[in-house]
Image (spheres, helix red, strand yellow):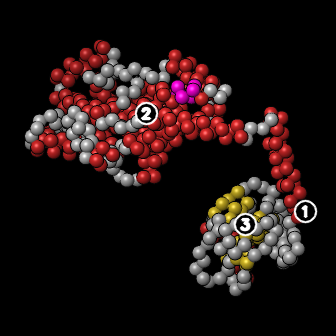
Amino acid sequence: MTKERTRRPIPENDEFSLNRLLDDDLPANEASSWRERLEAEPGLRETFTSLERLDHLLTECKSDQPSVDYAQLRANVMRAVSDQQAKRRLIRFPSWLQVGVPLAVAAGIVLLIWVQPLFVHREGTPSDSATPNQVAVIPSPADSELPASGEWAEASHAIRADRSPGSDDLVVRIHRVGQEDDELMHKAQVRFTRSANLAEYVRQEDEARSNQPSRYFFLRTSQSVSYQEVLAEAPPL
Amino acid sequence: MRRANQPLFTDEAGQRDAAWVQAALAGDQDAFGRLVETYERRAIATAYRLLGNSHDAMEIVQDAMLRAYRSLDRLSDPSRFGPWLLRIVSNLSLNARRSRRSGTIVTLDEQRGTGSVASGNGPPVVTSVDPDRQAQGRELNEALRAALNALPDRQRLALVLFTMEDWAQKDIAELLQCSVESVKWHVFQARKRLREILGDQISG
């Protein structure tokens, strides 16, 4: 009969205690009692022996030491630290500027966000799609940089948002155009809220515009629900 | 029988480190140099045990030290610099391991054919000069290495630091940000899994 067939698994608690015995982690009286049990119970003894062998093997791995030039390591680190410190010195501002600049930047951002709706519709913006919620347009998918807010460009997918009549819900329309297998090259960062009417709008838009060129653009809402994904893989509607 | 390992992250060490951290934050580069010197060996050993490669370990540790320096002002408790630094080292090492996805870890020494464990430069597992037994020993070490690589990160880290690097369980607990009991459990689970994988090769 092989060892495999005769070996009986010991309870996990016992096995854990044997680990603690191996690690000299048991109180003296418990350790002594476990040693007695090891004498009397072959199954426990066998487990403990294999634990000792494993520990022996692992301990032998200590001799596998890294070959590292510590002086070189230290020199490299300290050189990088010096460079870092030099950079910090270069961009050090007077103390009043250290507070003033971030405050001014924050104020500028707030102001920009506040006044942006006033400049959404620029010259050349097609009127048919100019809803109050459009703020930016992504150019054709091949372009990698976003245009300025409010500009338009042809694209194969479009998103549009309107306030649905009599409700505060923002309705997002996603327009998918063309039969070709579009390789989407843009990730659009779209902020939107969901609406019960959304699926129906999308369906209608797809149907109505299936043969027309369409446009990419960003949406702006008063809510800060953000979603970043390729348009064709918009979340379930 | 294994003897309890002495903790590294003691209160005294913490106070010393805190003073160095404060000095480094005030612009004293030498103070940071002393921190580097204090933890460089442990850092390298940790990275090496996770990556199995001296060159990678050195790169990871350099990166970790620089990251630590850059973020020194964000260290909320400067007396915990040691565990914090080694946590950065182990996280970077584990990330490197994951991105490498090479399956098994091969040491540079092994690649050169002069490895201590794998090729018998250090104390051999089988001391006999019998070629068959030497081959068995190498095979066993290879099996052990593969089995270690198959362990979950925390189990592997806990076992390796405890058994190969002689870290105290308390230090490992600080590194892993868990309790000492959890460390014992990780080590236990790791050994259990290794025994399952290695089977009769290490059975009594």
Q: Nearer the viewer, residue B136 or A6?
A: B136
Residue A179 on the magenta segment: no
Task: Report in which chain the residue with disc 3 lies.
Answer: A
The percent position of residue A79, horizontal first and vertical second, equals 55, 37
**Does label 1 or label 3 sit earlier along the sequence?**
1
Label 2 – label 1 distance at C-alpha: 61 Å
**In the rendered structure, are the residues bearing label 2 and label 1 in contact, judged by CB atoms less than 8 Å apart?**
no
Q: Amino acid at mark 3?
A: Leu
- Which residue is painted at 33% across and 16% down in the image? A27
Task: Report in which chain the residue with disc 2 lies.
Answer: A
Residue behind mark 1: A118
The percent position of residue A177, horizontal first and vertical second, equals 67, 80
Image mark for residue A65:
none
Q: Inspect this view and state whether residue A49 appears.
A: yes
In the rendered image of this protein, does residue A85 appear above or below residue A151?
A: above
**Would you call the spot at circle 2 few (<14 residues within 10 Å), some (14-19), or many (20 or more)?**
some
Q: Inspect this view and state whether residue B70 appears.
A: no
Residue behind mark 2: A70
Q: Nearer the viewer, residue A206 or B46?
A: B46
The percent position of residue B111, horizontal first and vertical second, equals 29, 49
In the rendered image of this protein, does residue A123 appear above or below residue B118?
A: below
For the magenta stretch, what is the residue range?
B30-35
Label 3 – label 2 distance at C-alpha: 48 Å
Q: Quadrant of the N terminus of chain A?
A: top left
Total numbered labels placed on residues in the image: 3
**Does label 3 or label 2 sit earlier along the sequence?**
2
- Which residue is painted at 52% across and 16% down in the image? B12
Q: Amino acid at mark 2?
A: Tyr
**Would you call the spot at circle 3 few (<14 residues within 10 Å), some (14-19), or many (20 or more)?**
some
Image mark for residue A146:
3
Q: Amino acid at mark 1?
A: Leu
